[in-house]
Image: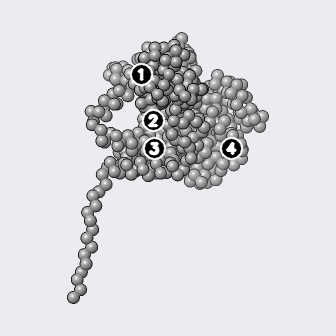
Amino acid sequence: MVQKCELVVPYLKPMSQLSKLLALINDATKVIEARTSSDLSLDSTATGKDDALSTPEVREAIRIIEGACAQLVASVARPSHTILNKIFAYSEPACIRAVVTLKVPDLLLDEPQGLHVSEIARRANVDQGKLARIMRLLATKHCFREVKPDVFVNNRLSIQLLSTNGLSDLALHITDEVAKAASMLAETLTDPDMGPSYSPNKTPFNKYSGYPGTMFEYFEGINTDTGGAQGARFGRAMKGWGQGIAALSVVKEYPWAKLPPGSIVDDLGGGVGSITMELYKAHPHLQYILQDLPKVISRAENETWPAQVPQALKDHKIEFEPVDFLKETPVPGCDIYYLKNIIHDWPDKECIQILSNVRAVMKPGSRILIQEYVLQHTTLEGINAGVKVAPDPLLPNYGEGRINAYNLDLDMMVMLNSQERYQEDFAKLGEEAGLKIVKVWDFGDTGLVEFAIKDEDIGMNGHAKVSVNGN
């Protein structure tokens, strides 16, 4: 008689959410270690390019780690403790503003053994005791390192705040006028006039500053003694912003090389052309046009480009054309119209006008590329098809892994009554302007929304195929 053998399977307890988060962190860490040889020690002050940290695989791993670590902490700590930490979050930017204003990172630049806070305070001409407390908070948050009691050195984070780095100007912009304006958010929301308004001069910035015009008018120095200097700082800060969000990913990851030689790229509202300079260096087979307001274009043509990329002028690869994109059409018949951080500055009505002005001069096969944040919901419901969703149990939008998109969305509301947008918002704007989305590119921090003429038959030419398929 043959007896049946029954296989006894031990009960396996399902992984807890905490274990899943830890597994995500562990797996993502292995990806980073395998794909970069960079010294990721916080003690390092090397300021080389972080190219290895900007590849798609590593970017994905980093945002998973950021999101999972924050979610893990929020899950295990006492809720009252976590909320207390959030309430006190103001202190870090306040301290960053202090050390950047005092140029503490610069004072420590050539001091590998560190400086005692008494010497830092002497050179900065401030009180030693107060500065020590500021430095210790930042060192506790891993910005600067305390090597001995009251002796501080730069580290991997503080070195980014040198006065020669645009991130220091960005730090001052955000911790000065933006933070002060944000402090009036509740008062503005409950103001019977400002609260429901989307006018660019009825914002928390206006309530805080008392300035009657828009932020851009303020930065131009119109009827203000201080706005012009802050506007110049804002211009420098935008270089730091591009560095912080790895804006140059567009140079490497959009298929510019597949465009035929001589294809024309119009950088519309491109300032002095920081992105276009990098595009020219990487893709010299293309022709470039830079368009912005007359004063900006004059500075770009006569100062910035001759100093930084004179060869582009000698090769006749760049043209400079002033334009007011709200009132005028850009140069007609370009292959690419590239708009970086333009649409998010404006309410829907003005955005539709800008896109309509471009649509009016596009030729068959032309594309509009809008590089800025593409927001996602924190729930799977409402996520657009094809949008990358974070692995479970992270929030679908990666939570803290993509928090800067939502930080900037609030920045836009506070300063301009404008906003970052979701894919469906971009689609509606395009529809109103006679355009349709053909692809949304994921560049890690930012996205790239690619528009074609609404009634264009995608795939009729090589340019369209490259743009849609990305190969």
Give the residue drawn at x 52%, y 41%: 40
> Label 1 belongs to which residue?
133
Give the residue drawn at x 33%, y 28%: 87
Asked which secondary structure carries label 4, the reply is loop
Asked which secondary structure carries label 3, the reply is helix
Give the distance between the C-alpha atoms of the residues marked 4 and 2, in whole angstroms.
29 Å
Task: Residue 36 in the image: state x and y as whole percent.
Answer: 55, 47
Q: Nearer the viewer, residue 356 or 450?
A: 450
**Mark 2: few/some/many CA within 10 Å (<14, 14-19, 20+):** some
Q: Could you tell me if residue 167 is visible in this image?
A: no
Q: Nearer the viewer, residue 293 or 37?
A: 37
Identify residue type, mark 1. Answer: Arg
Give the residue drawn at x 27%, y 58%: 13
The disc label shown at residue 63, or none = 3
> Label 4 belongs to which residue?
283
Given this view, does label 1 or label 2 mark the residue nearer the observer? 1
Task: Residue 416 in the image: state x and y as whole percent.
Answer: 46, 25
Indicate left or right for 23 with 9 as reference: right
Give the distance between the C-alpha atoms of the residues marked 3 and 2, in whole angstroms.
11 Å
Give the distance between the C-alpha atoms of the residues marked 1 and 2, in whole angstroms.
28 Å
